Amino acid sequence: MNPLLRRLRQDLFATPADSLLSIALLAILASGSTAFLHWAFSRAQWAVIQANSTLFALGRYPIEQQWRLWLLTALLAAAAGIGWGMLRSHPRTDRSGRLWPANDRIAALLLLLSLALPWALGLALPIQLRWWALSGLLLLLRWLAGRFGPGLPPALKRLLPLGLPLLYLIGMLLIGGGLGLAPVPPSEWGGLLLTLLQASFAILLCFPLGVLLALGRRSDLPLLRWGSVIYIEFIRGAPLITLLFLGQNMLGFLLPGGMAPERVWRAAWVLTLFAAAYLAEAVRSGLAAVPRGQVEAARSLGLSLPQAFSTVVLPQALRVALPSMVGQFISLLQDTTLLSLIGLMELLGTARTVMANPAFLGKNAEVYLTLAVLFWCCCAALGLGSRALERRLDPAAVVRSG
């Protein structure tokens, strides 16, 4: 019997009860898929997405300055391809040497979707060509990094992560203006650009803050311990939307005139402080999973307490807490939709503006489906990166790869 048929028989039709349940579920899936495809290809009107694709992506960003964002996207695609290739080439993830490992099927689906989406939305040909060129750049650098990355000097490999903060600073200069570029105020940022900017800013800063709060909560100093506890419990007990409104309205009264940051940055800092409290609990759970004997063993080797925590305890704790932390990052990305309630034109706020246009009334399903696909792509990318990192940090894989 064909191996595929044998596998299907074992998984779906092993017993009469399994067969009935599998047939019922397949019938439901087939009926739902048929109805969805009929709506998507014959009844849905995708003109609302085609006409507002730039608005969804960039908001009101000036057209004459959009070349900066294409340059930034190319840099991000290059960095993603190099990082992806380096992770996939590690001996703890795949040693087959194949161009596309078998356990990268979800990543393959994600890339195929990114290639097909511009064509399916009927975007202008120049935009489609640029998008496909960026996808090709990502794949090329992924293959090059996977092929030649293991041969790089160890010192250079250790320096590669430092390129991410540098890339973020370059991106902020390109988006906001600087070093001779015309300034673009945050009030003109919007759409997917603003969503990703807010999420990335909060993710980058909430991680060190969360680690410090988790260490502070376990400190022997009463003032530091109780200060961390009060902060964490207060933030976790307040809804995010309440904190966003407080951040937007209170800073203008508390800070002298002209010192209050832009509304975009007020929201970014609120998201950061909110996520740090939840991340601190995830890190604390990882710290609790590390036996106390690890610290004692490190101290017996002559390491100071800060050295013991930074080189022995924290790496183990962060490996345990990694799934929870990535889940928090994904929730943070989804929480950016609340920014539309305080007047910021992120992705959901832009969608509401489009749907309020009399020319596009009744096109809610098309708009919300496009938003769901965009958010799924971003969340799936975070999930893929976290799983690759988990496999690389898995201590059991050291024995298998050795």
Image (cartoon, grey):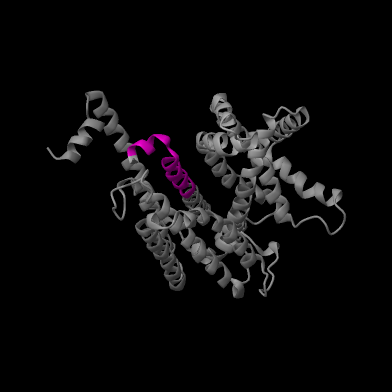
Looking at the picture, does residue 150 appear above or below residue 314? Answer: below
Instruction: Report the quarter where the C terminus lies.
Output: top left
Identify the residue at horizontal 61%, vertical 61% (top origin).
357
Which residue is nearer to you in this view: 126 or 108? Answer: 108
Looking at the picture, does residue 6 appear above or below residue 354? Answer: above
In the image, is residue 383 part of the stretch drawn in magenta? Answer: yes
Q: Where is residue 41? Give x, y as percent.
A: 38, 57
Identify the residue at horizontal 53%, vertical 69% (top origin).
71
- Residue 51 seen in this snapshot: yes
Query: Could you tell whether 71 is left or right of 187 in the image?
Result: left
Q: Where is residue 294? Give x, y as percent.
A: 54, 28
- Residue 337 seen in this snapshot: no
Q: Where is residue 299? Give x, y as percent.
A: 60, 30
Which residue is nearer to you in this view: 65 or 123? Answer: 65
Identify the residue at horizontal 68%, vertical 68% (top origin).
184
Instruction: Report the quarter where the N terminus lies.
Output: top left
Which residue is nearer to you in this view: 327 or 358? Answer: 327
Looking at the picture, does residue 117 appear above or below residue 330? Answer: below
In the image, is residue 186 part of the stretch drawn in magenta? Answer: no
| Rendered image quadrant of residue 58 | bottom right
Query: Could you tell whether 101 is left or right of 297 in the image?
Result: left
Identify the residue at horizontal 86%, vertical 49% (top origin).
253
Instruction: Magenta stretch: give its range.
Output: 380-400
Count numbered badges in the picture.
Answer: 0
Q: Where is residue 106? Give x, y as percent.
A: 37, 47
Query: Could you tell whether 284 is left or right of 79 in the image?
Result: right
| Rendered image quadrant of residue 4 | top left
Q: Residue furthest left?
A: 1
Looking at the picture, does residue 178 appear above or below residue 272? Answer: below
State whether the magenta stretch is mostly helix, strand or loop: helix
